[in-house]
Image: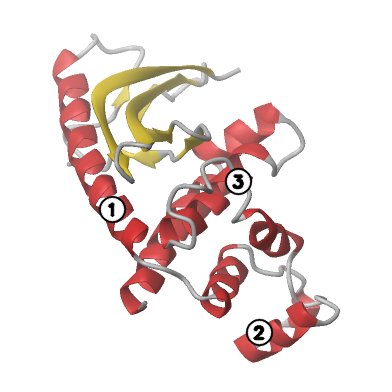
């Protein structure tokens, strides 16, 4: 069992005139597994939809972000984690503001979701964007179901009324799916978003959204 807690940091930012708020948290978890300590990571949460992004605190190796059960509790490590969380929150705010100001086209949006949720069947191999678009407009055999679902919910997800048509909205369609619709049950969904494949998918989706927004 993984025992976890969210520690709210007194820091937040908002977009669109204060209507779309993001709060900062530290996620602390204890896996109760020999050789592993308490893990601490930065976790911003978008209030309107409760979408969570889990990001490791990648400080200097000597500082550490894991508290070992066999060692005395080191309050300085926690202070360093808070400081790094502050820095990451500021970076995330800048990225969010940038994404909120840039608008997607339908073609770029579809390409983005197809990259975030690729078709995994090996028989399709590597296919061009033109073929993906042709497939999406016809039988959709080359398009993953999750990419289709993202296209369908981007305008209807919680908070869609804020920044409609922006790359912020496109990115949050991904985090909404990983947080609330993908997976067999809430426990497996949470595990994947915080520590598994969907953690990496969310971080990759953020980087890709910035990439597309820069080209917009």
Residue at 13 percent of width and 19 percent of height: 76
Which dot marks residue 89? none
Which dot marks residue 157? 3
Q: Is residue 110 above or below residue 50?
A: below
Q: Are marks 3 and 1 in contact (CB under 8 Å)?
A: no
Q: Are marks 1 and 2 in contact (CB under 8 Å)?
A: no
Q: Are marks 2 and 3 in contact (CB under 8 Å)?
A: no
Label 3 neighbour load within 10 Å: few <14, some 14-19, many 20+: some
SS label for mark 1 = helix
Q: According to the image, label 2 marks what residue?
A: 126
Residue 114: image location, x then y, percent:
62, 70
SS label for mark 3 = loop
Q: Is residue 39 above or below residue 168?
A: above
Asked which colour scheme the image uses, the reply is secondary structure
Residue 209: image location, x then y, percent:
42, 64
Which dot marks residue 97? 1
Residue at 63 percent of width and 49 percent of height: 156
Q: Nearer the viewer, residue 196 or 83?
A: 83
Q: Earlier in the sequence, mark 1 or mark 2?
A: 1
Q: Is residue 73 above or below residue 115?
A: above
Frontmost of labels 1 and 2 is 1
């Amino acid at each position: 069992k993984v025992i976890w807690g969210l520690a709210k940091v007194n820091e937040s930012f908002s977009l669109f005139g204060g209507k779309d708020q993001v709060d900062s948290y530290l996620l602390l978890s204890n896996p109760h597994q020999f050789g592993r300590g308490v893990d601490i990571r930065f976790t911003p949460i978008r209030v309107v939809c409760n979408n969570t992004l889990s990001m490791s605190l990648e400080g200097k190796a000597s500082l550490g972000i894991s508290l070992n059960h066999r060692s005395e509790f080191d309050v300085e490590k926690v202070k360093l984690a808070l400081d790094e969380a502050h820095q990451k929150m500021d970076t995330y705010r800048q990225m969010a503001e940038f994404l909120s100001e840039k608008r997607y086209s339908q073609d770029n949006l579809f390409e983005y979701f197809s990259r975030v949720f690729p078709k995994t069947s090996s028989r399709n191999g590597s296919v061009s964007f033109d073929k993906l678009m042709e497939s999406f407009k016809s039988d959709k055999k080359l398009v993953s179901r999750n990419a289709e679902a993202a296209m369908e919910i981007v305008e209807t997800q919680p908070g869609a009324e804020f920044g409609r048509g922006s790359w912020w909205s496109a990115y949050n369609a991904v985090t909404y799916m990983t947080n609330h619709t993908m997976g067999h049950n809430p426990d497996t969904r949470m595990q994947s978003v915080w520590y598994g494949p969907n953690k990496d998918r969310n971080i990759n989706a953020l980087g890709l959204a910035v990439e597309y927004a820069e080209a917009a």
